Image (cartoon, rainbow, N blue to C red):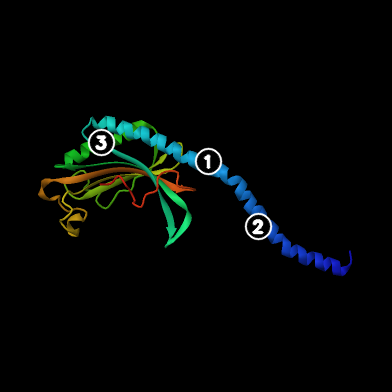
Amino acid sequence: MNKNSKKLFIKLLIFVFPIIVLILIFSWGYITSPFFDKFDQNRFNTLETQMQNLFQDLNTASNGIDKWNYSFFCSVNRTGWMKTGNYTCTSSTLVQKNVKSVSEVNEMNSTYQSVIAKSGILTQLKESKSESSNIFGNDFVVSSIEKHYSEKKSKIECDYLIKLYQSDRGLGLNSDSYGTAILNGQGRVLISLRCSDTARDHWYPLSDTTDPTIF
């Protein structure tokens, strides 16, 4: 191969090599995509099975007094107005009801926290106490507390929230401040266990809301 031929070969190689690399990358992605999709879907199916079982346990523990709601949904992830191409899929288990005393709140928290602990499906990661943690469970005021878990099989993280707030949503923003006394002798408590993670596809129904079970 003479000098000119070598130069031509090098130029051709410089031109062709990036194209070959791109073809290989796209081919690899095309070949492996079904495998990764199946793995991802199985992970969320595992989460749903686990959380459905826990939902049934919570309903049983309520003895028909509290109405637990369950849903599994996905939402489109965006950067600004542009879709990112992936989704967030969420398991949501929650109950809401009116309460008249802090003892009712404490009883609910104790009962359902015990069910969650005995289920054995969650590992507690850390406890994130809100600014009202020093009064939560002590005074009948707007307050909340959180716990953070990981579902053992899917490794998807879950957030437990119990919040006491005003039952009358027309009282104004000031009434929602942490530490504000529950007015008119009746508050509302929310207990929520949400598990979510980024998904490769919307394996469950798409929702435009952050939680279609909240009412």
Report the residue that reaches farthest toward the left: 184
* Mark 3 touches mark 2? (CB < 8 Å): no
Asked whether, in this view, residue 127 is left or right of residue 15, the answer is left
Sequence-wise, the earlier of marks 3 and 1 is 1
Packing grade of label 1 (10 A; few <14, some 14-19, many >=20) is few
Amino acid at the residue labelled 3 = Ser
Question: SS at mark 2?
Answer: helix
Which residue was labeled with disc 1? 39
Mark 2 = which residue? Answer: 22
Crowding near pointer 3: few (<14 within 10 Å), some, many (20+)? few
- Foreground mark, 3 or 2, reads 2
Task: Name the residue beneath numbered marker 3.
Answer: 110
Task: Say which element carries label 3.
Answer: helix
- Asked whether the beta carbons under mark 3 and mark 1 sit within 8 Å of each other, the answer is no
- The answer to whether residue 73 is visible is yes
N-terminal of the two: label 2 or label 1?
2
